[in-house]
């Protein structure tokens, strides 16, 4: 049995406790915990890519292919966010939002125009 010299029985004292426990004369607790709080980091909001709104613009109303452009810039915004370019993602997200707003406005105006024309025709037909 090959033991290192530090673990052989003649080098390790086996009798009695030769170590005394040190007591604090002031009666402080044995364990003191120190909590270090760093400065609060500013919360940086993640840029929004508006992908769901862009897909709805593409599927439900796509005048002048603006919904497709909104989806394109939403995907570019998401890619930039994954790479870590938050400023580029924010820029593409704003562009996608602008295309979505224009698409939604055109769809609402188109539906309003259709309802007005439909109402006008129903009114004229009923009064003939």
Image: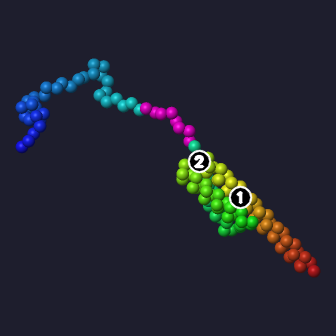
Residue 124 falls in which quadrant of the image? bottom right
Q: Residue 41 in magenta?
A: yes
Whether residue 86 is situated above or below residue 122 in the rendered picture: above
**Residue at x-position 81% and y-position 70%:** 114
10 shown above or below 97: above
How far across and how far down the image is residue 101, in percent?
A: 72, 57
Q: Is residue 128 above or below residue 22?
A: below
* Range covered by the magenta-colored residues: 36-43
Determine if the magenta segment contains residue 70.
Answer: no
Of the 4 image quadrants, the one containing the N terminus is: top left
| Circle number at residue 99 | 1
On the image, the x and y values in percent for residue 36 come to 43, 32
Which residue is rendered at x = 27% and y = 22% of the image? 24
- Of all residues shown, which one is farthest toward the top? 25
Q: Which residue is mark 2?
A: 86
Identify the residue at horizontal 57%, vertical 43% (top origin): 44
Q: Is residue 53 visible?
A: no
Q: Quadrant of residue 19?
A: top left
Few, some or many residues within 10 Å of mark 1 (<14, 14–19, 20+): many
Label 2: how many residues lie within 10 Å, few (<14), some (14-19) or many (20+)? some
Q: Which image quadrant for residue 12?
A: top left
């Amino acid at each position: 049995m090959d033991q290192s010299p530090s673990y052989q029985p003649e080098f390790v004292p086996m009798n009695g406790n030769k170590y005394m426990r040190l007591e604090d004369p002031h009666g402080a607790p044995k364990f003191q915990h120190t909590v270090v709080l760093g400065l609060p980091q500013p919360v940086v909001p993640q840029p929004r890519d508006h992908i769901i709104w862009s897909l709805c613009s593409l599927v439900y109303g796509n005048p002048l292919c603006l919904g497709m452009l909104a989806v394109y810039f939403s995907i570019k915004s998401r890619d930039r966010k994954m790479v870590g370019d938050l400023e580029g993602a924010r820029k593409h997200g704003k562009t996608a939002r602008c295309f979505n707003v224009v698409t939604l406005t055109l769809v609402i105006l188109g539906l309003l125009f259709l309802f007005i024309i439909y109402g006008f025709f129903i009114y004229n037909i009923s009064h003939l």
